[in-house]
Image: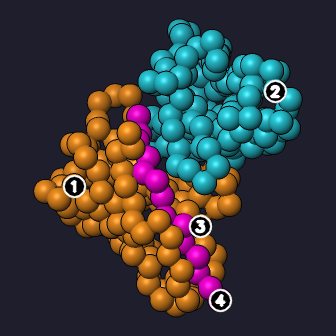
Chain colours: A orange, B cyan
Amino acid sequence: SQQGEEDPQALSIQEGENATMNCSYKTSINNLQWYRQNSGRGLVHLILIRSNEREKHSGRLRVTLDTSKKSSSLLITASRAADTASYFCATDPGGSNYKLTFGKGTLLTVNP
Amino acid sequence: SAVISQKPSRDICQRGTSLTIQCQVDSQVTMMFWYRQQPGQSLTLIATANQGSEATYESGFVIDKFPISRPNLTFSTLTVSNMSPEDSSIYLCSVAGLRNQETQYFGPGTRLLVL
């Protein structure tokens, strides 16, 4: 079964607004990663947060991680139409095999 | 990062036939993976392509259906054998372990439609 579960499944906002997506997982992790996918193409890595980190920023992205609740959130501030995409969280249990388990994803639509 | 290309980018195939998808990376990488993404769904890992040895398959995927080759550290192929309409998906390769980082880098995907 999928390790990560994102919510909401779909989110529609206006340009300039903030978008928040959540991810929950079931087992212990070494790190959690967020990826973006445009129109069924390849995935682009956005940000990685380790299990000993609580918050991380990258440009307009802010990721939080709560290992006690086994959850993470991705905040995109001041959204743009170009942010329209599917966003996936992926969990890495650690070890040397770098295997990821992906959540179901959130489809974000940013309306101009 | 790594530049990853896949061929073909898309194909339409008849049931019962096989298709081989190629994945080429512009640098040597230890870990290569193949994923399937069914329409409107998330990614499911098919297997880890191991250089010089047999691929490691995830539960629900078998070598007879998805044979994988990894002849060197920059190239891999995935074959979808004896295809049925249920195999219609996007197939993606990815790499990890660049500079010992956990980040995965993905190819653009191969969109397969089986009629």
Image vertical order of residue B62 relative to residue B86, above or below: above
Q: CA distance from mark 3 to mark 4?
A: 14 Å
Pick the front one: A60 or B65: B65
| Residue B51 coordinates in the image, percent (x, y) | 55, 16
Q: Which class describes the residues within 10 Å of circle 3: few (<14), some (14-19), or many (20+)?
A: some
Please give left or right for residue B61 compared with residue B79 in the image: left
Q: Secondary structure at mark 4?
A: loop
- Chain containing mark 1: A
Q: Secondary structure at mark 1?
A: loop
Q: Name the amino acid, label 3.
A: Ala
Is residue A107 inside the magenta stretch? yes
Q: Earlier in the sequence, mark 3 or mark 1?
A: 1
The residue that mark 3 highlights is: A85
Q: In the drawing, what numbered circle is on residue A112?
A: 4
The residue that mark 2 highlights is: B15
Name the front one of labels 2 and 4: 2
Q: Which residues are magenta?
A: A99-112
Q: Are the two marked residues, 4 and 1, in contact with CB atoms closer than 8 angstroms? A: no
Q: Which residue is pictured at 53% across the width and 44% down the height? A: B43
